[in-house]
Amino acid sequence: MTIEIGNIALRERVSQFLADDPGKLLIGGAWVEASSGERFSTIDPATGAVIAHVARAREADADKAVSAARTALISPAWAKMTPAARSALLWRIADVMQEHLEDLAELETLDQGKNLRTSLFGEVPAAISQFRYYAGWPTKITGETIPTSLSRTPPGKEVFAYTRREPVGVVAAVVPWNSPLIMTAMKLAPALAAGCTIVLKPAENTPLTALYLGRLLQEAGVPDGVVNILTGYGTEAGQALADHRGVDKLAFTGSTAVGKRLVSSAAGSLKRLTLELGGKSPSIIMPDADLPAAIEGVSRGIFDNGGQVCVASARIYAHRDVYQDVVDGMAAAGDKLRLGHGLDSAADLGPLVSRAQAERVSDFISEGRVEGATVVTGGTLSGPADTFFSPTVLTDVRADMRLMREEIFGPVAVVTPFDDLDEVVGWANDSDYGLAASVWTEGLSNGHRVASALEAGTVWVNCHSFLGPELPKGGHKESGWGYENGAQGLENYLETKTVVMVI
Ligand code: NAP
Ligand code: MG
């Protein structure tokens, strides 16, 4: 069977998935209704049409999912699985995802809105690469033996001490809607590599690829209860998981506002907590930059995915010698992008994720206009559901304006001229956030100096948004706690146990 969106026919497997009532919860290996029997709808943000009705999990479902994850944690099928077998399982998950790459991409686009090329060539491959990267780790998780100098050692005896690295336990993974599958993979892959079990709560706006992935995990042979999926609202299912005493670790990606609230939720049981939060990332363009590359890089950095990117290049500081060229170049880059349904191959940029998000972005612009910002290009909302926001370039934005200080999460760049390097580094650092930054220069010394001076978890030199599973990613200041990716990403899911023996 095939389902049509406008006049675009969906892929066979996506049509089948949607026709098969995909909206149940995955708990302990079974697809079940929410305890209350309630559902909510997930919509195509380009048209406002309902795609599917999805189970609305609440506290009772969180209890069941946590209990299933706890049972699976100590089940022989998972706890006794050898590291090599866990490694093979992660690789198999990647293989199965690869077989369904186009289905996952189409579904992500339909639910989230992003252009299909972004899903197909960027995000789904990036999600798969998380599983391939972490597939290498299970066989390399080791403790150490530690020589001791303890005076209490009985005569004739020795102390033998060593550490074991153990899975932290049941993980609640709560993810946002901007890049749903990548965010999910960034938590599942290291958690599985460490031997944890998981309850995943996707964003209410974008639950579908998580539900599709749930079926793929079963196909790959993930034992029942190792990954459980609760669709629902953050304030219900999400909060229930954050508060749950049976959850050992909460891995959260989302807004700083919610992240701060979760600190007190986690305090109840002192569960481990990592927070990947918001940003307002600065990009500094020096007079000696490769200007076309810089303009292209920062334009993509803010316009890709409609600016719904945590590391988006939202604040552009261009040296006065190149300022006008940067403003004009970014405006031209924005104007060139064709807005259209994510599945329309003639379009470059899809809608924002929801009407609410589009209104939020719009409000920022209206407020900025009143406060004296100049809209060089963009700033308009269009489309059947009023969700398409045109790529926007603003100038004359003062440091104290919300446009400069708050995360907009839309395709909105603020461009400001500078004269002096020390001064601009101060401006770049004048933010509560500290997620990412970029500097564009052909000068090696300036590149290193600015990279060292910027307060950010990632600094790019002559590139922006270059991310990979091997590169630690985290936020300084109010952009988060802890790091994902690489060896540090795995550490989030491991505890250390020290064993001391008298022998
Ligand atoms: P959000 O509102 O904070 O939501 C993120 C997730 O948390 C969603 O699943 C949400 O559920 C859930 N949630 C909401 N309230 C909750 C609560 N009280 N308890 C537990 N869970 C709760 O963020 P968003 O608007 O979806 O995503 C955009 C934000 O994510 C931006 O700030 C962006 O910068 C950030 N982000 C950060 C990174 C990074 O790596 N640093 C990466 C991507 C995105 P609902 O969907 O039901 O609201
Ligand atoms: Mg949706």
Image (cartoon, rainbow, N blue to C red):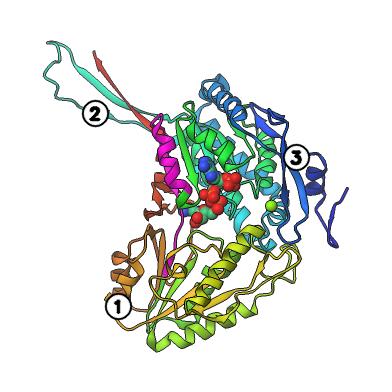
Q: Residue furthest right?
A: 1
Q: Residues within 10 Å of mark 3 (few under 14, many from 20)?
A: some
Asked whether the viewer can see residue 44, the reply is yes
> Is residue 274 one of those drawn in magenta?
yes
Looking at the picture, how far across and down is residue 422, in whole percent? 27, 75
Residue 376 or 65: which is nearer the viewer?
376
Which span of residues is magenta-colored? 258-282
Q: CA distance from mark 2 to mark 3?
A: 51 Å
The residue indicated by pointer 3 is 22
Q: Amino acid at mark 3?
A: Pro
Q: Earlier in the sequence, mark 2 or mark 3?
A: 3
Whether residue 181 is situated above or below residue 319 in the rendered picture: above
Q: Amino acid at mark 1?
A: Leu
> Is residue 454 one of those drawn in magenta?
no
Judged from the image, the secondary structure of the residue bearing numbered disc 2 is strand
Question: Quadrant of residue 236 in the image?
Answer: top right
Looking at the picture, how far across and down is residue 269, in whole percent? 41, 29
CB of mark 1 within 8 Å of CB of mark 2? no
Q: Earlier in the sequence, mark 1 or mark 2?
A: 2
Whether residue 289 is situated above or below residue 340 in the rendered picture: below
The residue indicated by pointer 1 is 421
Q: CA distance from mark 1 to mark 2?
A: 48 Å
Residue 167 or 206: which is nearer the viewer?
206
Judged from the image, the secondary structure of the residue bearing numbered disc 3 is loop
The residue indicated by pointer 2 is 146
Residue in the image at 68% along x and 27% along y: 35
